[in-house]
Amino acid sequence: MAATGELIRLINYVDDITTTLRRIQASLYGMDAEERKRLAESLRSADERLRELLAEVEK
C-alpha cells in the first residue's frame, strides 16, 4: 500500500515533534526548579491532547 502525500507530511510532523522533545530534554540541565515546573505544566497539557489524538487515530 502506497503512502499518500498527506500521510507522509503528517509523519514528518510527528518526526518534528520527536526532535523537539529531544531538544527540550537536552535543555533541562540549564533550567531552575520554577522553569521546570512551568514546562511540566505545558507538557501535561500537550500530553492530554496527544492522548486524545492517539485515541482518535486508533479508532
Image: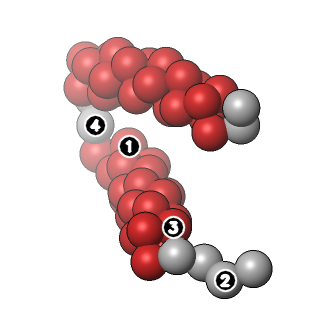
**Number of other residues with Cα within 10 Å of mark 4, as a class: few under 14, some 14 to 19, many 20 or more:** few
Q: Which residue is mark 1?
A: 28
Q: Secondary structure at mark 1?
A: helix
Q: Three-letter amino acid code at disc 4?
A: Met
Q: Three-letter amino acid code at disc 3?
A: Leu
Q: Secondary structure at mark 4?
A: loop
Q: Is residue 31 left or right of residue 6?
A: left
- Of marks 2 and 4, the one in the foreground: 2
Which of disc 4 and disc 2 is earlier in sequence? Answer: 2
**Number of other residues with Cα within 10 Å of mark 2, as a class: few under 14, some 14 to 19, many 20 or more:** few
Of residues 4 and 53, the one drawn nearer to the viewer in this rendering: 4
- Of marks 2 and 1, the one in the foreground: 2
Q: Three-letter amino acid code at disc 1?
A: Leu
Residue pictured at 38% horizontal, 19% vertical: 45
Number of marks in picture: 4
Q: Tell me the tag on residue 31.
A: 4
Q: Which residue is mark 2?
A: 2
Q: Is residue 33 left or right of residue 9?
A: left
Q: Secondary structure at mark 2?
A: loop
